[in-house]
Amino acid sequence: MSDAMTDTAQGPAISITGLRKTFGDSVVLDGIDLTIQAGERIVIIGPSGTGKSTLLRCLNFLDAPDAGLVRIGDLEVDAARASKAEILALRRRTAFVFQNYALFANKTAAENIMEALITVQKQPRDTARARALEILAETGLAEKANAYPASLSGGQQQRVGIGRAMALGAELMLFDEPTSALDPEWVGEVLALMHKVAEERQTMLIVTHEMQFAREIADRVVFMEGGRIVEQGPPTQIFDAPQDPRTRAFLRRVG
Ligand code: ADP
Ligand code: MG
């Protein structure tokens, strides 16, 4: 925590201000304000259809927000007038882990990790491959470097998905329900890898329904409902002494 405090000399590492997103007539993000310190782990919980995925996707313009500011480090992007170059720059500072892994089926585990290093970061192929092998070793998949996704278990595929995000060295890692597509037997190894990422003081924004995991990994838990942040605080506060009736009702349902 003390490191994070020093980083606040120029404000938080990441800030989101007044973020809004509508799909047709429905307001999906209704003015989200959130600041994140360097190295902080934030878990977002809330009912389905409440805008959690949309929030993550708006942070790197997978969905383009209608309005609001997204600032990561010294890069500030005004959603209403974001240029292509700004969007690309924002994408370079974030790494996304998808619920359904989103691996390239026709690429090996190593090639999946190399892809963005080569195309986005313009690394030479040899450098990218060395980095991919290093990451696969870290994720416990060294022997799967040349395996195609179809021959991997769901847990292994998601570990490649997380490895791909780790390799980018991004300032912010975004996880959208990374275990919810997995058979129960593979959930543990994926959560264990996320704990390992967290130990490296990676800044993480995680949407999950794994409440025990949230309690363990989160510095702060954010409860969202209806496109708004209803309540946030340390896990003990949110899970053991929620203040808002909507948070209480949600936790009763999932608990
Ligand atoms: P959550 O992740 O909390 O379950 P989402 O962010 O996926 O919620 O969705 C929030 C709302 O936005 C839902 O009502 C959903 O149907 C709607 N929505 C999400 N993406 C789109 C889209 N591309 N087009 C239209 N509606 C969408
Ligand atoms: Mg979602």
Image (spheres, rainbow, N blue to C red):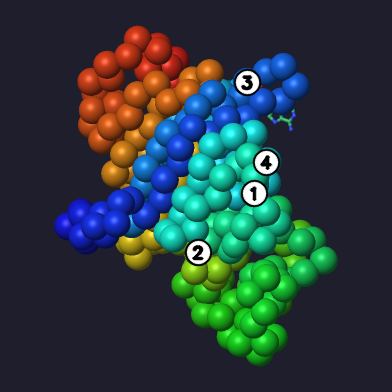
**Disc 4, SS:** loop
| Residue 57: quadrant of the picture | top right
**Disc 3, SS:** strand
Q: Is mark 1 within 8 Å of ligand 1?
A: no
Which of disc 2 and disc 3 is earlier in sequence?
A: 3
Q: Which label was assigned to residue 64?
A: 4
Mark 1 or 3, closer to the camera: 1
**Disc 1, SS:** loop
Residue at 50% across / 27% down in the picture? 31
Q: Are the residues at dot 3 and dot 2 in contact (C-beta closer than 8 Å)?
A: no
Residue wearing tag 1? 82
Vertical position of residue 246 compared to residue 82: above or below: above
Residue located farthest toward the bottom when viewing the structure as drawn: 126
Residue wearing tag 3? 27
Disc 2 and disc 1: Cα gap in Å?
Answer: 20 Å
Q: Position of residue 120 (x, y in %)?
A: 67, 70
Disc 4 and disc 3: Cα gap in Å?
Answer: 14 Å
Q: Are the residues at dot 4 and dot 1 in contact (C-beta closer than 8 Å)?
A: yes
Which of disc 3 and disc 1 is earlier in sequence?
A: 3
**Amino acid, disc 1:** Ala
Residue wearing tag 2? 170
Disc 1 and disc 3: Cα gap in Å?
Answer: 20 Å
In this rendering, position of residue 215 left or right of residue 205? left
**Amino acid, disc 2:** Ala
Q: Position of residue 77 (x, y in %)?
A: 55, 50
